[in-house]
Image (tube, rainbow, N blue to C red):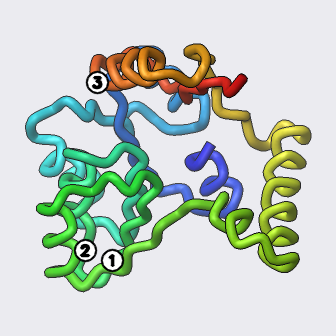
Amino acid sequence: MVIRFLMLNGINNIFSTCGNRESRRRLNSMGLSEEKILDYCDAELAEKLKKAAGGSFDVCFDTVGGKMSECSAEIVRVNGIYVDITFLTTERARLALFDKACTVLNVANFAYALHGNAESLRFYGEELTRLAELIQAGELNATPIEIVGGFSVETVSRAHEMLENNLTHGRKLIMTID
């Protein structure tokens, strides 16, 4: 969804990573060409991304955390922008981002609802409405989901196992709360 949203806003020089054929197919369907999709399991990912892009990146969106946060910190330029959607950066990544004087943007749209004031809730509602309108108009595809079960230790464990073994195939994992 992030990729398509960026494209709708005129940003087209986008690179992404994936780890399986289904995720690659999904990225292709969003408009990314093969040369702009790299395997995140590749030991030389950072070097290949920099080579494909012709240098470092102005902006990196980290939607995974962990080792990907380190890769993003390595490829973003000095004074670049690191967009963190996970809050799972490693200490090594945080140090690299600090050393490069990067701007770190923490994206957590739900934060507006946590504050409970009318203005924050209005903004959050407008953003959700805007996304819904783009989805309904067919300009943005909703992210595919997989309901992994009710919220429990076992379900959380199974979801982590799926993530660690690259079994999500681009789907967001959802747990229900009964």
Q: Amino acid at mark 2?
A: Arg
Q: Residue at x 33, y 18 (%)?
A: 161
Which is more foreground, mark 3 or mark 2?
Answer: 3
Q: Nearer the viewer, residue 30 or 54?
A: 30
Residue beneath disc 3: 164
Q: Quadrant of residue 89?
A: bottom left
Left or right: 15, with 43 as reference point: right
**The C terminus - image quarter:** top right
Is there a contact, CB below 8 Å, between mark 2 and mark 1?
A: yes
Which is more foreground, mark 3 or mark 1?
Answer: 3
Regarding mark 2 in the picture, which secondary structure is present there? strand
Residue 136 location (% of width, % of height): 90, 38
Residue beneath disc 2: 77
Left or right: 1, with 48 as reference point: right
Q: Earlier in the sequence, mark 3 or mark 1?
A: 1
Residue 8 location (% of width, % of height): 70, 55
Regarding mark 1 in the picture, which secondary structure is present there? strand
Q: Residue at x 20, y 52 (%)?
A: 71
Residue 132 sits above or below residue 162 on the image: below
Residue 70 location (% of width, % of height): 19, 55
